[in-house]
Image (tube, rainbow, N blue to C red):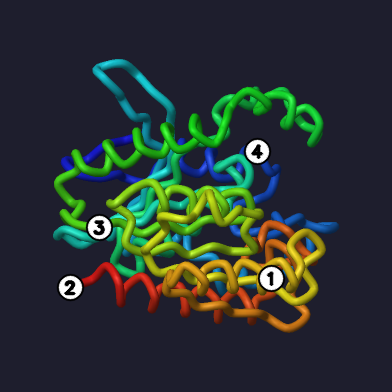
Amino acid sequence: MCFKKDGFEPDAERRAFVAGSIGLAIGGLSPAVAQGGGVAPVAAPPPPTRVLDDARALHGPVRFTHNGQPGIGGYLARPAAEGTYPAVLVIAGNRISEEYIPNTCAALALAGFVGLAPDIFHVIPDSARTLDEMRAATARHSDEDVIHDIHVGIDHLRGQSFVRRGGIGVVGFCFGGRIAMLLGARSREVDAVVAYHPGPVTAEEIARLEAPVQVHCGTADRNVSVGAIRALEAMLKAQRTPNEIHLYEGADHGFLAYTRPPRYDPAAGALSWRRSVEFLRRLLVP
């Protein structure tokens, strides 16, 4: 990772980070393969929600220190233009090295935010491949431990000269959507929560959630039902938490993750992201 004064210079380490754990070529482009000396096939265009190569964003892996000691890592993106920007946390539902998570941070940078994805799954060894192995590795890493990790990330953000003072936003996916709401309920620093097909929460867990919440979910989600989203909506309304619920007809779980065809839905992904950015700007940008 190559640091400049207050940011990052994209380099080979960044490219390796986002490509390594999913085994995909950057951008999902097929490598050109010469066939019998002929012309290589034309690569398909990248998904419309992929922005990692846009020069207007600087991004790369970071490592936090906490109480003077090396801590966990994360992925940070910021606008290339000089200035100060509101911060938005990205809470993943899986390893942050899956390309769509760094891409989400970069998309936030293009929208005028500093995006940071703390590595809340740092307890999972690289050798873990199956869901059972991952669950075993995180069995003793509680919600409280995860939120502590996120607060270390917030401390890191507060120390950056390009981060604007004031409230922060949180964008969470699946389990990360659940954690985003828990964080909003426990931290007065959170002014906006965006939850994509969030994991279940109880009324007790989010009783103190006052920050506005925006929820995105597909009607064909095989992990989070429309009924579960409507129950969450009723829960938020009952405690007078401002909320927006957006359902996407025919979209499945993870519809924003272009690394997961055929679940990726370009139209629903683009629309949901536009709504997310508008929501965050409304609540975080003076």
Q: Helix or strand or loop: what does disc 4 sit on?
A: loop
Q: Nearer the viewer, mark 2 or mark 1?
A: 2
The amino acid on which the numbered mark 1 sits, given as a three-letter code, is Ala
For this rendering, which residue is in front, 17 or 241?
A: 241
Task: From the top left corner, tell me how far across and down residue 90 is, in percent.
Answer: 46, 52
Q: Helix or strand or loop: what does disc 3 sit on?
A: loop
82 versus 131 height, above or below: below
Q: CA distance from mark 4 to mark 1?
A: 22 Å
Q: CA distance from mark 4 to mark 3?
A: 33 Å
Disc 2 packing (10 Å; few <14; some 14–19; many ≥20): few
Kindly identify which residue carries mark 4.
Answer: 21
Q: Helix or strand or loop: what does disc 1 sit on?
A: loop
The earlier-in-sequence mark between 3 and 1 is 1
Residue 55 appears in the rendering: no
The earlier-in-sequence mark between 3 and 2 is 3
Tags 3 and 1 in contact by the CB under 8 Å rule? no
Kindly identify which residue carries mark 2.
Answer: 286
Instruction: Name the side, left or right, on which 77 lies relative to 133.
Output: left
13 versus 68 height, above or below: below
Task: From the top left corner, tell me how far across and down residue 63 is, in percent.
Answer: 37, 30
Q: CA distance from mark 3 to mark 2?
A: 11 Å
Residue 82 appears in the rendering: yes
Disc 4 packing (10 Å; few <14; some 14–19; many ≥20): some
The earlier-in-sequence mark between 2 and 1 is 1
Q: CA distance from mark 4 to mark 2?
A: 38 Å
Residue beneath the point at 40% across and 69% down: 212
The amino acid on which the numbered mark 4 sits, given as a three-letter code, is Ser
Kindly identify which residue carries mark 3.
Answer: 167
